[in-house]
Image (cartoon, rainbow, N blue to C red):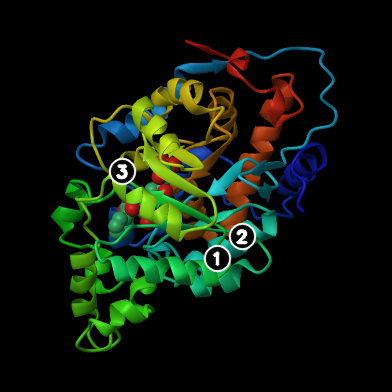
């Protein structure tokens, strides 16, 4: 497996310095601006904006500023290794490629490029229900890499069963059930442009490749993508979903189940009490409830309450190596990336995704070393202070 730590960081930084690696940019904070130069307006309008006026998306990033790392000195950190195991899956670093839909908006290779990049680096890709490539195609692209599947639980139970069967047959071992998007949030940028990719037939490959879904269509999706988009729009919303439905899912899926979108301590406890294996503390990158609390601000109390019973993962607002270190120090076992790797995809396909991930992991490694630590196991609340 790829090693991130002492050797890898130095080699990658040296390669960029010598111009052997075409550095798209090493300025991770500047990725969004660079991606904005290459993304089509329609794609840009879908990817970058958040719900409402973007207050939660900004708060997600600002929350990281309020925690500062307190470096320790003269502690041997010559041997470092970022490798970890999350719910039984080995990973070269505590960073997953989070579920992001409609990736062909960023690059024609879409989810295939992300799956390949994840496998090349020994990281785990979470394939979205809302993908532009089907879960079977993405499984092929993953090769011998690990595979997790993100479920948008459709209101049609037969379709849901079909998704689960296909994910299992496709070699996906873990289910990430996104619970914060039973309805799409209020997104003015999408509404003002009058454009939603799925209504144009994009980002619904998992549906149009599904026998249950296609049986309900009058004409093949290739002949009438608009009708397929409308059919999707009728099965996607699921506002009636509630905790008592999880028993059914628990019966139906033998592998680990992770609930994505938890923001309250009591919901974290409910996830545990309903037999879930993990949670992702997340507010969907601020794309759902504008005005919601910054994701990082909810992490310490949730990790404190359930961290010993459940695998606690984190996303929303992670933009750099130091951000990853702060989230781990505050109780996350690993983080999911959203927009940053999508910007890498827009800028350079698979190579762009790999570049963003390698840069972020090199920065994480140097931050770990500079703060005086050698291993992820050393991290905890003692490594940071609230400023
Ligand atoms: C363009 C886009 C599409 C997304 N699609 C999905 C999706 O299909 N399923 C899902 O669970 N989350 C989806 N998310 C949310 C991400 O998984 C993740 O929670 C979020 O991007 C994290 O915030 P960040 O982008 O600020 O890092 C999407 C996010 C973006 C930006
Ligand atoms: O855009 C999103 O954030 C997302 O998760 C989603 C939800 C439904 C359809 C497409 C994407």
Q: In what element is the residue under mark 1?
A: helix
Q: How far apart in space, not on screen, are marks 1 and 3 (Cα)? A: 35 Å
10 Å crowding of disc 1: few (<14), some (14-19), many (20+): many
10 Å crowding of disc 3: few (<14), some (14-19), many (20+): few
Q: How far apart in space, not on screen, are marks 2 and 3 (Cα)? A: 35 Å
Q: How far apart in space, not on screen, are marks 2 and 1 (Cα)? A: 6 Å
Residue 174, percent from left and from top: 53, 55
Q: Mark 2 near mark 1, Cβ–Cβ under 8 Å?
A: yes
Residue 332 visible in the shown view = yes
Task: Say whether disc 1 or disc 3 marks the residue closer to the N-terminus.
Answer: 1
Looking at the image, which residue is at 85% across and 28% down? 78
The numbered mark at residue 117 is 2
Q: In what element is the residue under mark 2?
A: helix
10 Å crowding of disc 2: few (<14), some (14-19), many (20+): many
Which residue position holds label 3?
Answer: 243
The numbered mark at residue 113 is 1
Looking at the image, which residue is at 57% across and 63% down? 115
Residue 209, percent from left and from top: 38, 79
């Amino acid at each position: 497996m790829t090693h991130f730590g002492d050797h890898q960081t130095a080699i990658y930084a040296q390669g960029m310095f010598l111009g052997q690696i075409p550095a798209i940019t090493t300025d991770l904070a500047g990725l969004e601006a660079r991606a904005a130069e290459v993304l089509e307006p329609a794609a840009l309008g879908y990817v970058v904006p958040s719900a409402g006026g973007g207050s939660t998306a900004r708060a997600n990033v600002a929350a990281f500023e309020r925690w500062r790392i307190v470096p320790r000195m003269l502690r041997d950190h010559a041997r470092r290794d970022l490798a970890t195991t999350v719910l039984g899956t080995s990973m070269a670093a505590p960073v997953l490629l989070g579920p992001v839909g409609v990736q062909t908006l960023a690059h024609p290779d879409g989810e295939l490029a992300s799956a390949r990049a994840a496998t090349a680096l020994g990281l785990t890709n979470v394939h979205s229900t809302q993908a532009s490539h089907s879960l079977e195609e993405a499984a092929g692209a993953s090769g011998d890499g690990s595979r997790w599947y993100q479920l948008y639980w459709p209101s049609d139970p037969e379709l849901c069963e079909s998704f689960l069967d296909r994910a299992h047959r496709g070699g996906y071992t873990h289910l990430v059930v996104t619970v914060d998007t039973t309805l799409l949030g209020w997104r003015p940028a999408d509404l003002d442009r009058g454009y939603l990719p799925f209504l144009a037939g994009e980002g619904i490959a998992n549906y149009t490749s599904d026998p249950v879904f296609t049986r309900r269509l009058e004409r093949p999706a290739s002949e009438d993508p608009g009708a397929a988009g409308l059919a999707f729009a009728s099965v996607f919303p699921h506002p009636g979903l509630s905790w008592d439905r999880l028993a059914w899912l628990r019966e139906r899926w033998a592998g680990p189940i992770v609930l994505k979108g938890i923001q309250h301590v009591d919901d974290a406890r409910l996830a545990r009490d309903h037999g879930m294996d993990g949670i992702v503390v997340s507010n969907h990158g601020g794309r759902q409830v504008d005005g919601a609390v910054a994701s990082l601000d909810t992490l310490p109390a949730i990790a404190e309450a359930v961290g010993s019973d459940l695998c606690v993962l984190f996303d929303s607002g992670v933009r750099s190596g130091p951000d990853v270190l702060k989230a781990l120090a505050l109780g996350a076992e690993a983080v999911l990336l959203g927009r940053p790797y999508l910007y890498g995809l827009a800028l350079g396909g698979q190579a762009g995704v790999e570049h963003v991930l390698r840069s972020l992991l090199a920065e994480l490694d140097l931050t770990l070393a500079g703060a005086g630590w050698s291993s992820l196991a050393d991290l905890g609340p003692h490594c940071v202070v609230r400023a």
